[in-house]
Amino acid sequence: MHSTLTEHAQCLYGDGPRPTPGCPVRDHDEVYFVEELTFADAGTILAMLRALYPHYVDGHLPVWLRNLTYRLILLQRPDEPDLMREAALNLDFHGPDWDPIAAELRRRADALDPEHPATARPQR
């Protein structure tokens, strides 16, 4: 059994740019991992992403699973503009299919945080 969500992800998908670590668990089950992810708190999910993918595009976590992780985080923390921008950036890395969703996340983030450098208008 894995002691953390991060450890479970490492065993299933690798450890970002580093080689996949050895793992004592013989039966890896992606469905069990997704169940564990589904009920994890936002901090635990973010810790996994930060540990495995500190540069956003490193690693081997499937795109569908990265999208799900950000969705779960934003459902738990719906009013955090920096997380919305991070999720939008993640969508940008994986093709134009999600451009409208990324744009909507940025719009919501800008509405919550109009003073952010990406949002603020120059003063005249």
Image (cartoon, rainbow, N blue to C red):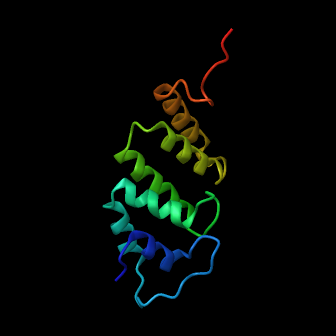
Name the one closer to the observer, 123 or 101. Answer: 123
- Which residue is rendered at x = 40% and y = 36% of the image? 79
Name the one closer to the observer, 121 or 38. Answer: 121
Left or right of 66? Residue 73 is: left
Is residue 49 shown above or below 19? above
- Which residue is rendered at x = 66% and y = 12% of the image? 123
x, y percent for residue 76 = 34, 47
Left or right of 47? Residue 88 is: right
Is residue 18 shown above or below 119? below
- The count of marks equals 0
Is residue 40 shown above or below 32? above
Most extreme residue toward the left is 39
x, y percent for residue 11 = 49, 80
Q: Quadrant of the N terminus?
A: bottom left
Name the one closer to the observer, 3 or 69. Answer: 3
Q: Quadrant of the C terminus?
A: top right
Most extreme residue toward the top is 124
x, y percent for residue 116 = 57, 29
- Which residue is rendered at x = 45% and y = 57% of the image? 46
Name the one closer to the observer, 110 or 98. Answer: 110
x, y percent for residue 115 = 55, 24
